[in-house]
Amino acid sequence: CQGYSGMNRFNKGNWSMVQNSMVMAYLSFADFYRPRYFLLENVRNFVSHNKSLTFRLALRSLLEMGYQVRFGVLNAGNFGVAQSRKRTFIWAAAPDEALPEWPAPRHVFKSPQLTINLPGGVAYTAVPQRPGAPCRTVTVRDAIGDLPPIANGEARAEVPYAAAPASAFQAAVRGSNPALLDHISKEMNELNLERCQCIPKDTPGADWRVLQQIVAADPGRAKFKGADLVPWCLPNTADRHNGWRGLFGRLDMAGHFPTSTTDPQPMGKVGQVFHPSQDRIVSVRECARAQGFPDGFRLSGNVHQKHRQVGNAVPVPLAAALGCKLRQALE
């Protein structure tokens, strides 16, 4: 299995070209080794990137090799994580093998944009959305509500659990792990910490626009140690970027995480990175919980490297669901 992160709508330069070549390199591995099964994972936009030429080339290459092929878009939220994360998958099986089916959703989760538009006006959805599922949606509270509070930039190697697990998800990811690993937070500078402290807690939808309201009510707060409290680029370019919705936003305990990235920051591609009730960026462990990693899973490097490892991963419950389907095909 291989995943890539370069074909997103924010990246149209040389690095995206490198990522395209990685897809071709992976297909060449399949051509050389001719494995019994092949699974490729990529971002949702893979199916439409470059007018769908790369996606279609991948399918045609596998078919030319003699593989049976199945493709579709799945959302990890349907498989037991508190995160909206849509990804394209391509299954391939050798001619004499059973082609794995798609796993059925286990959790209720509103999942738009799972349909792939094909030539001739045909629309295809690998796993059609149903009104219900066996399990309810996993929320942010379910995922991280048991974790102890930490400060901005706190980096202790191990932290004791603050309370007993309060959800089935928490009990599952804890397992028999005696202590909490990687519950560490990236350190914000004074300006971003001040901005974070201005965003109200337990107020779903609150984001950078609250800073505008604060300055409008008290012009004396427009500057913080000589810097703009409201980043200049946000109000001046908001009309071209969907209002920069979510930037400097807090997570909603009753909602879900946005798509996990490799570098959570308040002005990043996904700016909703503040803890619901603490003045800090979500910790590595909280992001790992959003991806369904067990608490005992060890990450390597500094806080930035650990965030990158978590953000690049396929959510564990979704990977497990696909693995179960592969096992059924093998049996």
Image (spheres, rainbow, N blue to C red):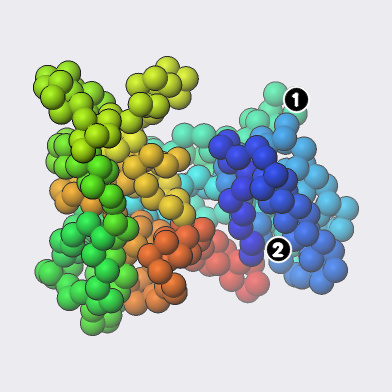
Residue at left 84%, top 64%?
Answer: 31
Question: Residue 158: x and y, percent?
Answer: 25, 77
Res 8 seen here:
yes
Residue at left 45%, top 40%?
Answer: 269
Residue at left 19%, top 42%?
Answer: 194
Left or right of 220 in this view: 260:
right
Question: Residue 25: x and y, percent?
Answer: 78, 59
Question: Residue 206: x and y, percent?
Answer: 23, 32
Picture quadrant where residue 154 is located: bottom left
The secondary element bearing badge 1 is classed as: helix
Establish if 63 lies above or below 238: below
Type of amino acid under label 2 = Phe
Give the CA distance from mark 2 to mark 1: 28 Å
Picture quadrant where residue 209 is located: top left
Give me the disc on residue 38.
Answer: 2
Res 47 seen here:
no
Establish if 18 lies above or below 163: above
The nearer-to-camera label among 2 and 1 is: 2
Picture quadrant where residue 40 is located: bottom right
Q: Nearer the viewer, residue 131 or 72?
A: 72
Give the residue at mark 1.
120
Question: Residue 182: x and y, percent?
Answer: 32, 70
Crowd band around label 2 with a 10 angstrom C-alpha radius: few (<14), some (14–19), many (20+): many
The secondary element bearing badge 2 is classed as: strand
Residue at left 43%, top 21%?
Answer: 237
Q: Residue furthest front?
A: 226
- Quarter holding the C terminus is bottom right
Establish if 162 lies above or below 269: below
Type of amino acid under label 1 = Gly
Left or right of 197 in this view: 8:
right
Q: Nearer the viewer, residue 139 or 269?
A: 269
